[in-house]
Image: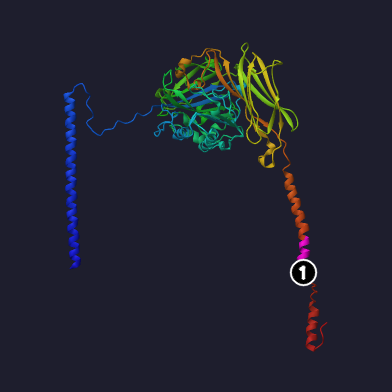
Amino acid sequence: MALRRCCSIVSLFGLIALTIFVVALSQASTVKNESVKKTTKQMSKVGKGTPNVKKQHSDPVAVVPPKTPKDDFQEELAIRPLHSGDIYASFQFRTLWETDFFGGNKVSHYRLFPKSLGQVISKFSVRELHISFTQGYWRTMQWGQPYHSSPPGAEIWVWFQDSVEDVDGTWKELTNVLSGLFCASLNYIDSINSIQPSASFKPLGINNETDHRFLRYAALPRESFCTENLTPWKKLLPCGSKAGLAVLLKSEKLFHSSFHSQAVHIRPVCQGKDEHCTSTSVELRQTLNVVFDYITSGQGKREWSLFKMFSRTLTEACPLASSSKIYVDVSDSAEGEYFVLSPPTPLLTQAVVLGDRRNFSVYDLTQRSTFGATSSLNLLIRWTSSEAHMLRPLLHAERYVAGSGLHTGEIHTLLYNNHPYRAFPVLLLDSVPWYFRLYIHTLNVTSKGKNNSPSYIHYEPSKDRVKPHMLEMLVQLPPNSITEVSVQFERALLKWTEYPPDPNHGFYVGSSVISSLVPSIVAMDTNATHKSPLFNTFFPSKEEFSYFVRLYTEPLLINLPTPDFSMPYNVICLTSTVLAVGYGSLFNLLTRNFQIDEPRPGLAKRIANVIRKIRGVPPL
């Protein structure tokens, strides 16, 4: 009975609480509906009574969404048939975002711009970032000037913002992050192999006053380039490798070539046609350059197509790209006297590239008519003659090591000015490791057998195991001349723990960097750069009749005095043998117990002893 009464009381209290909750909920909904109706009536009265005032939105709680920054993506492929019968293909992917990474604003929404790079720029206050990975050496005298130069191995140079206090610490953290982002050995970059150039590597973005204290440059000439570096690079593209020109980036074909180089360039640019540059945008350029050799590829004949080069054809453009084009340089065979291009295209354009006016056949991938009836585009270049001649580049550089023995040596850099009547200055930058001790007083610059005194020299000596040598100089190159720069050095003897696993292979010295404004054959129109192809708009023109060129020489491979690392092995073996024989014998003599063991009698003697024992006779 008591249990029944308790259950009844609990049920009654639950019913009363449920009734109170339902009544309160109905009153709240009635009040809310009345307030909404009242607000709507007031807004309608305001709209009717004041005809000059715009009507507001009927929803009283509507919020205006924030303005989304505009972004734009363009892709292009430039193909240049070389006079040697090889093919030079240059991919460029450009992402332009109208946002201010450089003003300290935090960006949380990403659409086309890769978020991984955006977070790096914001966190480390990066103003400009340039990084490249290259396998092979660009043969300037055979292939001409590339659209973008890069040294063998890995190269990185960064401009930090003025707000960065600890530049060295930020530089170290940035290289560690980029090492994981691109699967490279950039985490080995430290003060030993990084420098602060004072005149080279000026910003490529907005030309503001800069302080070279916020610039860091480093190169790893021994860094290799493989699929592990290409895969994260392709993931930065808006379409990845699923659509557009990126479907041609097949690693099996790219790495089976004479030269391949990938790069990432980030810089600030002015928005639109703003002359005063009151608002900035961030520009990301991803470039990939590759040279296919018809001998190395095993074709045996000078005939190229997209399928032979990349094992794939094009079927569509990237849906997120506003522009997707292929440019084929037909300047050297305008009438088809050297090679034939098919399928033909009626779209032709002219552009001033590296000081020369070039003609290009254009294929617009955003137009379905480009793919034809097969819905596939496979460009074919068939050589008809091998008598084409290439004009020598106006600026060329080489470098080599002279001397004998493993104590001293001499570094020679040759600068070629092939212009028949124009002289122009070049800025030479050399970074030499500390274990090659330069004798800067032996620096000698000669042109046409005469001394050529540099107008500017900036030298920072090295510190053992701290930082390398840095030498910058501005040299005037006479017309049609060869200028030789030589300096002597001494090889240091390292500690045995500082030698790499293959010390007899030698030690690498990074490429020399040559920057110059080379006289142009034709005048450049700097006001129409937005209409030019991407491969022609990266380096700005400083003068009307000159264009900017940056060249890299060969990296040097120099031997150091190396001890015979087999001697410790021999000493260890000899010592172990002596210890085993000498100490082992002595130890046995000191610890072993010697006992006389009588020989065991034979079978006949044992039988005789048994018989003698039975007879009671003493044993034998």
In-front residue for pair 380/393: 393
The type of residue carrying mark 1 is Asn
Quarter placement of the N terminus = bottom left
**Seen in the image, is 311 located left or right of residue 596?**
left
Label 1 packing within 10 angstroms: few (<14), some (14-19), many (20+)? few
Expressed as whole percent of the image width and height from the top left, the position of residue 274 reads 42, 19
Q: Is residue 472 visible?
A: yes
Quarter placement of the C terminus = bottom right
Expressed as whole percent of the image width and height from the top left, the position of residue 40 reads 18, 32
Q: Is residue 227 visible?
A: no
In-front residue for pair 617/340: 617
Most common secondary structure along the magenta stretch? helix
Residue lying farthest front? 165
| Residue at the spot 74% in from the left edge and 32% down from the top edge | 407
| Residue at the spot 57% in from the left edge and 34% down from the top edge | 225
Above or below, 368 against 61 in this view is: above
Residue lying farthest top? 421
Expressed as whole percent of the image width and height from the top left, the position of residue 158 reads 53, 29
Boundaries of the magenta span: 585-593
Q: Which residue is mark 1?
A: 593
**Seen in the image, is 619 located left or right of residue 498?**
right
| Residue at the spot 19% in from the left edge and 36% down from the top edge | 36
Above or below, 48 against 577 in this view is: above
Q: In which image quadrant can residue 16 be found?
A: bottom left
The kind of secondary structure element at disc 1 is: loop
Is 591 magenta? The answer is yes
Expressed as whole percent of the image width and height from the top left, the position of residue 501 reads 66, 41
Is 338 magenta? The answer is no
| Residue at the spot 49% in from the left edge and 25% down from the top edge | 77
